Every structure is written in C-alpha cells, then in structure tokens.
Amino acid sequence: MPDVLSAPLVVEFPFTRSLGPVQSAFLTGLRERTVLGVRADDGTVLVPPVEYDPVTANELGDLVEVAPTGTITTWAWNPSPRRDQPLDTPFAWVLVRLDGAGTALLHVLDAPGPDAVRTGMRVRIRWAANRTGAITDIACFEPYESEPDGVEPAPHSGEFTDPVTGIAAPARLDYVHTPGRAQSAYIKALEERRTVGERCPSCRKVYVPPRGACPTCGVATAEQVEVGPRGTVTTFCIVNIKAKNLDIEVPYVYAHIALDGADLALHGRIAGIPYDQVRMGLRVEPVWSEGARHVDHYRPTGEPDADYDTYKELV
C-alpha cells in the first residue's frame, strides 16, 4: 500500500456584491459611526438590517438608528485567533443586542480572559480609526458599565453623502487535505508521467481520478488501471476572464477530456491550437512541465477527430 499523502490547501474566493438601499445605508452608517436597523412588520427592530421581512417576506425600508451600547446575549471564547480575524489577541465571539434593537449582532469582545465575560454583560462599540463602510468599521466591542437607556430607536432617512454601493467579501478556507489511498497512488503515478485509475469490480468501469469506491455501484475499488496518455475532448469552455495568480493569457480553453481507457472525463487546459478551433471530438495528448508533478496542458495529436458515438456517454 502506498504512503498516504497530505498537504496544506487553501480555497479562496474574493466575492464582490452590490448593495441594495438597506444594506448600503447600514454600511455607510457604520462609516459615519451610526448604527442603523430596520423595523419589521411586527415592529421588531432588526440589526443588522435585512431587506425583506423574515416572516412575511415583505420588502422593508423603515430605517431607525439604535444605540452603540448593548447587552451580550451569548458568547464563546476564542483562545487562538486566526489570520484576518478582528483581533490578534484572544477574544470572545459575542452576540450583542444593541439598545433599541430586537435582534443580536455578531461581533467580537476585547476582554482579558473568559472569566471577564458573561451573558447579560453591558458593552459598547469601539470604532475603528479608519472606516470604509464595512462591518470592520466596528473594531470590536468593549466592556461598558451602564444601564439600558430605554430610549426608543429614532427614525433615520438612511441618506448619507457618498454612500457605499458595493463590497468585496473575501472567503477563504485553510485546511490540510489528505487524499487517501486511491488518490495518493494517482498523484504518485503522475510523478512518473503516468495516469492511473481504478476499475469497479461490479460494473467494470474505470474511474479517473480514482476515489477508492465506484460512484455508481458504491463498492470499493482496488484494481489499478493505467489509461491514456491520449484522449478525446468531450466538451469545453472558453475562458475570457483572467484568474488571479494564474499566469495564463486569455482567452484559453478548459475542457473535459476522456482519456483512452477511462470511463470518466477529467479536466485540463487545451493549448497548441487557436482557441476557436477547439472542438468536441478533438484528439489530444498531455504536455508535461519540466520538473512538475502534473500535466501542464493538452495539445492536438493530429489524429482524425473521434466519432461522437465513442464518447457521447461521457459528455
């Protein structure tokens, strides 16, 4: 049995979205040290505000200003802050119901330790020195000795100079990936410029990359089968937007490729041919990068195109 591999892996996606009038007012308000909520159909003030009533689904727009002070409704201690979290020292995740609000806001509390945090604790906002119109304009909450003021939330127009109309919300997941026995063998074979799959003992199909079990029959697979190296383009797309940290000029073609002997198409980049000449049925072969452990791209072999009936089940 080959050694099982493992490696750190990062999945990151910088999501960018536009804002409607309610979210725009909320984030612009934070920039101006003002916390806005929205009144729901039943009179509850929702903070953070939402654009549609969670019960009736009616559109909401009755904005009100709430206080920068509030009460912790629940909390959890974080002893080991991670990259890009609000504080770089241990802190508490807290749900805070701001004075005048009917719902709680998730943020962090700067406290010396878990013994200094409790449900019902009074806190206030500590504003960031540089505010841009984001939830991080609230740097954190801090302890604040006070009593609820009982003041009703004040109506607010939601109008500000230079409103925030869009935000970037980067999402990132850092983890250690362990591919398992079957994929470890697949990766090790790639180091030798070979592509291997595994055959299902029941349906006899060969799956590449292997998963250690047949996705159709659900039975374990162990019989290793070398496939390719040549294959057939079953379908493809033309990429016109350049990806971050990917040194490939657009446009380029990404395709599903059925390697000879495989019953599942894998994906790869097509090069060595103008992008507008790539087609279904094109016969291709791998091109390996010098010193790399994977195929860099696939190029045409010069063979006649494969007949559609030979790969139609893999489209």
Image (cartoon, rainbow, N blue to C red):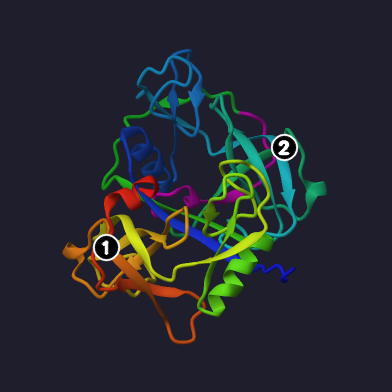
Q: Position of residue 162 (x, y in %)?
A: 26, 48
> Is residue 131 in view?
no
**Which residue appears at 57% of the width and 45% of the height?**
203
- Whether 6 is drawn above or below 90: the answer is below
Q: Quadrant of residue 278?
A: bottom left
- The single residue placed furthest to the right in the displayed view is 115
| Relative side of 19 to 288, left or right | left
Q: Callout 2: 10 Å neighbours few (<14), some, many (20+)?
A: some
Kindly give the residue lying farthest to the bottom in the view shown. Answer: 290
Foreground residue, 150 or 164?
Answer: 164
- Asked if residue 143 lies in the magenta stretch, the reply is yes
Which secondary structure lies at badge 2? loop
Q: Which residue is mark 1?
A: 282
Where residue 280 appears, as percent x and y from the top left, is: 26, 56
Give how far across and how far down residue 218 sits, in percent. Answer: 63, 42
Front residue of this view, candidates 200 and 315 = 200
Horizontal side, residue 129 vs residue 6: left or right: left
Q: Amino acid under label 2?
A: Met
Alpha-carbon distance for marks 2 and 1? Answer: 67 Å
* Mark 1 neighbour density, 10 Å: few (under 14) some (14–19) many (20 or more): many
Label 2 vs label 1, nearer the camera: 1
Above or below: residue 282 compared with residue 107: below
- Tell me the quadrant of the picture where the N terminus can be found: bottom right
User: Would you say residue 111 is visible in this rendering?
Assistant: yes
Residue 238 is marked as none
> Of marks 2 and 1, which one's residue comes earlier in the chain?
2
**Is 224 contained in the magenta span?**
no
Q: Which residue is mark 2?
A: 121
Amino acid carrying mark 1 in the image: Leu
Residue at image coords 30%, 73%? 299
Q: Which residues are magenta?
A: 132-148
Q: Quadrant of residue 8?
A: bottom right
